[in-house]
Image: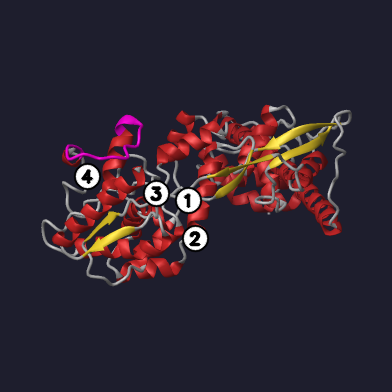
Amino acid sequence: MKTYPWNWLEHIDCENSSYGSEYFYKTGYEGRKSSENLRNGYNIINNAGNTGNYGRNMYAYRNAGKTPYNASGNAVNRISQNTDRQKKKSSRRRKTHNRVFWLIAILLIVSLTLIGGYFSYVYALNSSASSGVKVVVPDDPKVSFDFEIPLGSSTKDIANLLAKKNIIKYPLFFKILSMYNGYDGTYQAGVHPLEKGVDYNNLKGYDRLMNILSGKPRDNPTVDVTIPEGKMYTEIEDILAKANLINRETFNQVAENENYDYKFLKNIPQRPHRLEGYLFPETYKFDVKPTEKAIIKMMLDQFDKVIVPEYYDRASQLKMSMDNIIVLASIIEREAKVNEERPIIASVFYNRLKSKAPLNRLQSCATLQYIIFNRTGVIKDTLTLDDEKIDDPYNTYMYPGLPPGPICSPGLASIEAALYPDATGYYYFVAKDDGSGTHYFSKTYKEQQTAMAQAKKNREALKK
């Protein structure tokens, strides 16, 4: 076998000699055996040869580790460019991997910190809650100041009020902690003393606030107000205003526009004084500084307490809505003076409602008084024939059936009379006017005329 010196590649014209290219290709294997340097050279050339013509892409090395070259220089430039691009891509990959790694690490650290802090806080709160210890603040102006929670305030309302008074800075944070710590719904309306000089703007401070505000407030001064049976909406408003408990304009706005979720108020029609008939007559103990909504809600709560489920069932049996029952009860309330007569008066109205014209008109003087009072502000005791001709939907002398709404707030006795009327054949009644407060009841119009004549004699007798 023919051998070549180690530097034989220097003398081959790789660009122009096909012999050199071919010969080198054919004998490369043998040369690789005989020289370590040639082995390195052949490997480079073999790699280059895979991308194209072996003769045009040979590398020649004088010594191992020196800069490669070829006859044309083209192949070396392309490989160098590819190598640079690969290095750049590799560098970009490393940078991207580094960014992702650090991002994940930072998120993990933050998450672990928050989780650890949360469970530490929950543990502390649970430990405090399990002790059952309530924070007691001395009711002394030297060391405390007053914070008042209005009646009906929600957690959001309380948080906003605390922020408004610069007691806390983050009402949303207070609201969230209150929900998670189970304080929602436990806050007590009224005046609470809070410590002077205490920073409540931290986890411990927020928890301390919640503890104090969910405790028993200072005993608030109250005022007793009686709403008698049979009072109209505007009369009730007068009573509350005279007690300095309401602003009239605010009271009306709240009464007409606020939503009240009670079964008895569902599906009532549009009419003046939406809550007419539903502000239940009772003696109430109001705070001296209540909100208008709190007053209304207290009265509606009392109505809801009085109207038991049995009453709804009974109204259905009579084929009446609860609103119809209250309308009728309000008329009974204004007509009756003696409790024993309420079911009898109710029977007269039911008999008329079931009759044909003209008896299907209730012809109640109380409805005329309601119309006149709302127009003039004065209750007219003695009515005339002209009053019976007032064109108004509440005029039961002119229009058949029930009026559009209640004419006052009826008491329980009148409501029960409307639900459980006596069974009678009466269609008429007239006040005796003898000082007893009772009535004459008649089945026919002729009997009614006789009763009216007797009532006139009674009035004349009282004048003597």
Main secondary structure found in the magenta portion? loop
Amino acid type indicated by mark 1: Phe
Position of residue 254 in the picture relative to residue 179 (left or right): left
Q: Which residue is mark 1?
A: 280
Q: CA distance from mark 1 to mark 4?
A: 24 Å
- Image mark for residue 116: none
Q: Of the residues under marks 1 and 2, which one precedes in the sequence?
A: 1
Instruction: Work out whether residue 58 or residue 455 is closer to the camera in this orientation and state it.
Output: 455
Q: Position of residue 437 (x, y in %)?
A: 38, 54
Tell me if label 3 and label 2 are in contact, CB under 8 Å. no
Position of residue 116 in the picture relative to residue 160 (left or right): right
Tell me if label 1 and label 2 are in contact, CB under 8 Å. yes
Q: Which residue is mark 2?
A: 306
Q: Of the residues under marks 2 and 4, which one precedes in the sequence?
A: 2
SS state under label 3: loop
Q: Which residue is mark 3?
A: 277
Q: Position of residue 141 (x, y in %)?
A: 85, 29
Which mark lies nearer to you, 4 or 3? 4
Q: Of the residues under marks 4 and 3, which one precedes in the sequence?
A: 3
Instruction: Work out whether residue 435 or residue 35 is closer to the camera in this orientation and state it.
Output: 435
Q: Is residue 316 above or below residue 395?
A: below
Circle 4: is it few (<14), some (14-19), or many (20+) Cα within 10 Å?
many
Residue 308 shown in magenta: no
Question: Residue at image x 29%, y 36%?
Answer: 372
Region in magenta: 375-387
Residue 42 seen: no
Instruction: Work out whether residue 217 or residue 220 is closer to the camera in this orientation and state it.
Output: 220
Q: CA distance from mark 1 to mark 3?
A: 7 Å
Residue 376 shown in magenta: yes
Q: Quadrant of residue 7?
A: top right
Question: Residue at image x 77%, y 49%?
Answer: 118
